[in-house]
Image: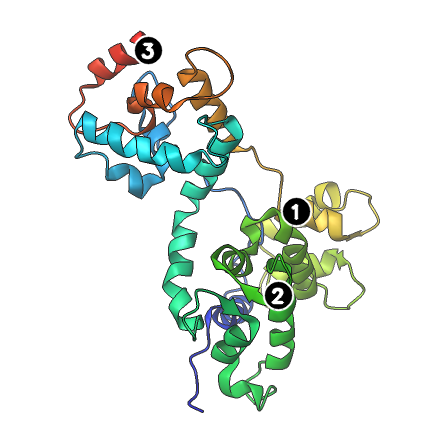
Amino acid sequence: MMKMEIRPLLMCFALCVVYATSKPTEKKDRVHHETPLSSKEHDDGANFDYDHDAFLGEEEAKTFDDLTPEESKNRLGKIVDKIDADEDGFVTEAELKAWIKKAQKKYIYDNVERQWKDFDMNNDGMISWDEYKNVTYGTYLDDPEPDDGYNYKQMMARDERRFKMADGNGDHIADKEEFTAFLHPEEYEHMKDIVVLETMEDIDKNGDGFIDLEEYIGDMYNHEDEMDEPEWVSTEREQFSEFRDKNKDGKMDKEETMDWILPADYDHAEAEAKHLVYESDTNKDGKLTKEEIINKYDLFVGSQATDFGEALVRHDEF
């Protein structure tokens, strides 16, 4: 068997090893923050650029810049059909929120799409655990503990555990959404426990199932005796004692670790969904028809050469 290229999760592992041996003053950040919906300021009094980026994703929003108003409305109508998940003719706040979250994850889906053909060896539109294992580990299956510093047997067991968690129906076969959850577990609610577990396993050097202060600092700071401890390390020690270790027992358990690496950030998608419904819901029934959305097309998607003064006039008329 030809030696296969080490695949994404192995590469991620290798990068983590490099990170751990990098300059001692560099700080490793394990916290997963929600990405902003747009880099632009949200000011509807000036323009609707933020709303366009939030609703479509920044790259997709740019594709509407050269469309006429009629072309924009037509394309928006097709999008509305996709948002209406239960096909009842209305778009609810929850459906809008789900759509916005999906639009913001487009770069993730694109990344999965690029990798898909490498793993779907039999081209059946699914990826089994065996396919992933054979492509990812290849020749290492015969020698799971080679002399290159990696324990592939341990890494494969960890991957299989994550794969099973992502595999919703337990058939050891992943569809696109399940495989996305496998590669990007931090983006999925049902995968949060595995993200926490893997993080704790990485940091918990004494194997007691907790993260103490020295393990917490040791994970982000590669100490060298000849160097003075950077100021940020002292700050992190205080953060651990004052905020991370909530029950003050000198260590972080699973719940405390989850609060640290997966903080309950402000839900930008939910806020934007509420905003779009509020601005577009003409009859105030709490949900949107396709007509109501298209009437406010300039809020959702915009178009080419639409003078913003005209857009504001339409915005007020509707």
Q: CA distance from mark 2 to mark 1?
A: 33 Å
x, y (%) of residue 150?
Answer: 58, 80
- Judge the density around disc 1: few (<14), some (14-19), many (≥20) Cα neighbours within 10 Å: some
Q: Could you say whether the residue bearing mark 1 is in a helix, strand or loop?
A: helix
Residue that label 3 marks: 318
The residue indicated by pointer 1 is 260
**Amino acid identity at mark 3:** Phe
Foreground tag (2 vs 1): 2
The scheme the figure's colours follow is rainbow
Q: Quadrant of residue 118?
A: bottom left
User: Residue 215 versus residue 234: which sits nearer the camera?
Assistant: 215
Under mark 2, the amino acid is Asp
Q: Mark 3 Cα within 10 Å, few/some/many (few <14, many 20+)?
A: few
In which image quadrant can residue 166 be found?
bottom right
Give the structural element (helix, strand or loop) at label 3: loop
Q: CA distance from mark 1 to mark 3?
A: 44 Å
Q: Which residue is mark 2?
A: 171
Count the marks: how many? 3
**Location of residue 317 in the rendering, given as x and y in whole percent from the top left corner:** 30, 8
Q: Is residue 8 visible?
A: yes
Residue 149 in the figure: left or right of residue 317:
right
Determine contact: label 1, label 3, CB under 8 Å: no
Instruction: Left or right? Give the position of 269 relative to 142.
Output: left
Determine which quarter of the picture holds residue 1.
bottom left
Dot 1 amino acid type = Trp
Q: Which SS class for mark 2?
A: loop
Is 292 placed above or below 142 here? above
Q: Residue at x 57, y 86 (%)?
A: 141
Residue 69 x, y percent position in the rendering: 20, 25
Q: Return the disc, 2 or 1, that comes first in the chain's sequence.
A: 2
Instruction: Report if residue 151 is visible in the image.
Output: no
Q: Which residue occupies the extreme right position in the image?
A: 249
